[in-house]
Image (cartoon, rainbow, N blue to C red):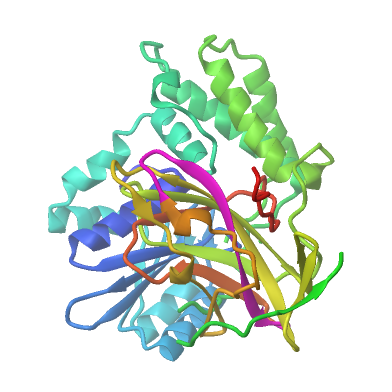
Amino acid sequence: MIPELEPEEFVSFLAELWRERGWQVSRKERADETHFILGKRGDGKRGVIYVFPTASATVTERHLKQFVEFCRKRGVDVAVVATQGAFADGARRVAGQRGVHLLDRSTLENTVEEGGFEDLLRRYTETSGLDAAVERLRALGVPIPDDAVPGGVSDFGSTVTAAAGSVVAAGLAMVGRDDGAGDVDSDGSSGSASRGSGSAGGDGRDAASGSGRLSGVRTLASRSLPAAVVPVVLVIAFVIGATMGPAIGLGGGPVASDGGDPDVSALSTADANATLDVRWNAKSTESLTVNGTTYDAPKEQTFLLVRMNVTNRNESPEQFAESALAVEVAGERYGTQPLDGVTGFPSAGLFEPGETREVWTVFSVPADAESATLLIEDDRRVRFSRDRTVTPEATVRDAAA
């Protein structure tokens, strides 16, 4: 059996495995922390891997039935469910009846051996605990320079991983979080939405017991950590506080919601090889006021405002075009919503090498939308990461600035 991977690493490994098998893949992280890996092949076949990435997940019969229905509606040719956890007997029965492939770590080991993918697996299993922790923090939007990761400390990676695990466990225990897989949502055309009127004026794992989680923190507290570990653990604690603080009574960033927001996710087109890192956050609102002008959403629609912190990691300029962005709601795609006289994409979305800049855009979506997926419709290698510390607002610099 292959060793347990970090959830994000497990998803990345599956995506790379499919790429090695000739699939063009993209990823979608869902609100319940499961993932879809969407694949296309040159022969026109479409495939989906429904991923439950944690070792504590149990895939149930209900999950399988919902996934089968999803695949039927979307015309999926190859349906796969993967987990580091377990499959309930009912799930295995439905999979056998409906031709769904099931992958756990034992089955994956056979797949790796039969396909000769040992080198690919080694890239993930030989990553140190420190590297995995740092990579996960970067995916969450924490800026950690390469030269800030110390070396030469014995068992540094495993110590950081243990510390991070204890901090995360404590947060989950205090929140009393339920990570059940929930319902399977739809994912992906139509043109852009109509322009808003302007008028002058002014987001399959059972929660473990709290006592068990907190005991991990007590163990951590009694352990002597190398001095170099402490800053990384503090950064992890900061991330947990920022993302989970409001739920457990700690100070946190602003809440990016007006109430009744649709469940918004984003579809990345690249993983570690992304040239553009996009940290984003979103909210829905009936109207926007920008530079003293108020824009109202069209009748029976609502605005979805998305603000993005974009970093060009390429060695040449990259175009991150507003016109290439869309949101998908219930199988329909909506383009960006023009607003008279203002834009959240200065310099036409051109980013110089290494440049980081915040931009924003607006979509008009049905007012009764329950979920929406942010995506990019060109071939840019983009990695989307939701960051709730990014305040979704529409601001325009003064012309004189």
- Vertical relation: 102 (above or below) 110: below
Q: Quadrant of residue 259?
A: bottom right
Which quarter of the picture shows residue 23?
bottom left
Q: From this viewpoint, is residue 29 visible?
A: no
Residue 294 position in % (x across, y down) = 79, 70
Give the camera-side residue of 46 and 147: 147
| Residue at image coords 54%, 23% | 232
Residue 198, horizontal then vertical, whole percent: 75, 76
* Left or right side of 39 for 136: right
Is 101 drawn above or below residue 174 in the view shown? below
Question: Is residue 352 at least partly visible in the picture?
Answer: yes
| Residue 364 within the magenta-colored segment of the rendering | yes
What residue is drawn where x is 64% and y is 80%?
365
The vertical placement of 43 against 118, above or below, is below
Residue found at x 86% / y 67%: 201
- Choose between 311 and 158: the one closer to the eye: 311
Residue placed furthest toward the front: 400
Residue 250 lies in what quarter of the image?
top right
Q: Quadrant of the C terminus?
A: top right
- Looking at the rendering, the stretch of residues picked out in magenta corresponds to 351-368
- Measured as percent of width and height from the top left, residue 203 is found at 66, 61
Q: Position of residue 211 (x, y in %)?
A: 74, 36
The secondary structure that most of the magenta stretch takes on is strand
Q: Which one is in front, 53 or 199?
A: 199
Horizontal side of 119 relative to 361 (left or right) equals: left
